[in-house]
Amino acid sequence: MKKTKRILAIAGVVLLVALYASTLIFAFIDHTKSLGLLKASVALTIILPVLLYAYTLIYRLLKKDDN
């Protein structure tokens, strides 16, 4: 279980770094679709950590009920 958590944490960090990088790249690109991609990237940069935090809170609450 500990190894799985570590792998998922590393995957989450890689995903967030990729989102930050894509946000920066889309901000500098002057293309017709770049504005929509920038909006999506910023939204996911905000929403993904919130969802991960909510998932960990729910997991802790459900795990306490099992004991």
Image (spheres, rainbow, N blue to C red):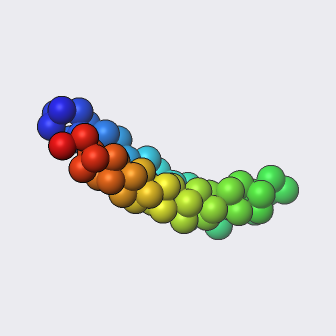
- Residue nearest the observer in this picture, 20 or 54: 54
Residue shown at 48% from the left, 62% from the top: 50
Residue shown at 44% from the left, 57% from the top: 54
Identify whether 36 is placed above or below 63: below
Identify whether 25 is placed above or below 1: below
Count the marks.
Answer: 0
- Horizontally, is 4 left or right of 58 in the view? left
Counting from the top left corner in percent of width and height, residue 21 is at: 49, 58
- Residue nearest the observer in this picture, 24 or 19: 19
- Horizontally, is 9 left or right of 50 in the view? left
Residue shown at 25% from the left, 40% from the top: 66
Specify whether residue 9 is in view: no
Counting from the top left corner in percent of width and height, residue 27 is at: 65, 67
- Horizontally, is 29 left or right of 14 in the view? right
Residue shown at 33% from the left, 46% from the top: 62
Counting from the top left corner in percent of width and height, residue 41 is at: 62, 57
- Residue nearest the observer in this picture, 48 or 23: 48
Specify whether residue 15 is in view: yes
Q: Quadrant of residue 7?
A: top left
The N terminus lies in which quarter of the figure?
Answer: top left
The C terminus lies in which quarter of the figure?
Answer: top left
Q: Residue furthest left?
A: 2
